[in-house]
Image: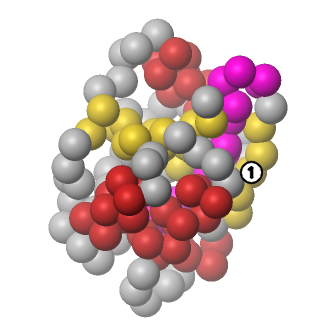
Amino acid sequence: MKVGISSTGKTFQDQLDPRFGRAAGFIIFDLDSGQSEYLDNQGNQQASKGAGIHSAQNVVQAGANAVITGHIGPKAFAALDSGGVKVFQSEVKSVQEVIDDFRQGNLTQAHNPDKPGHWQG
């Protein structure tokens, strides 16, 4: 299972980015193999619109089955949902702590977005 974590940087010591669509990037972590890759999201950080949808498409294309982020808007949520990707939310912690929380079942699946469209955080 692959999990996409919105991140402020490329390492497991970096913090969870509380924004999904405008996150600095995403760490795609394979829980089974322990392999990871980083998806830079710089192009979507400055987008005037569509950041959430484009970020969701990138995470889906990377093969993520789940996403962990702080907050998510309606269009990104719908795009992930249509791609079969479950959304989980977390407080800002290190990426490693968020992965540990996910593995231990300490994160709750989101069933709805928690921010309005065009939220910049």
Residue at 23 percent across and 54 percent down: it is 113
Answer with the quarter of the image where residue 4 lies: top right
Q: Quadrant of residue 69?
A: top left
Location of the C terminus by quadrant is bottom left
Q: Answer left or right for 78 relative to 23.
A: left
Secondary structure at numbered mark 1 = strand
Classify residue 36 as left or right of residue 88: right
Instruction: Tell whether position 53 is magenta.
Output: no
Coordinates of residue 21 in the picture (x, y in percent): 45, 65
Residue 58, given in percent of the width and then of the height, sits at 60, 64
> Where 30 falls versus 51 (above or below)?
above
The quadrant of the picture occupied by the N terminus is top right
Residue range of the region highlighted in magenta in the rendering: 19-34
Residue 14 coordinates in the image, percent (x, y):
64, 39
Q: Which residue is mark 1?
A: 38
Q: How many marks?
A: 1
Residue 18 visible to an observer of this rendering: no
Q: Amino acid at mark 1?
A: Tyr
Residue 24 appears at what percent x and percent y? Answer: 59, 61
Task: Give the residue at x 40% y 86%.
Answer: 49
Q: Is residue 99 visible?
A: yes
Vertical arrangement, residue 64 with respect to residue 33, above or below: below
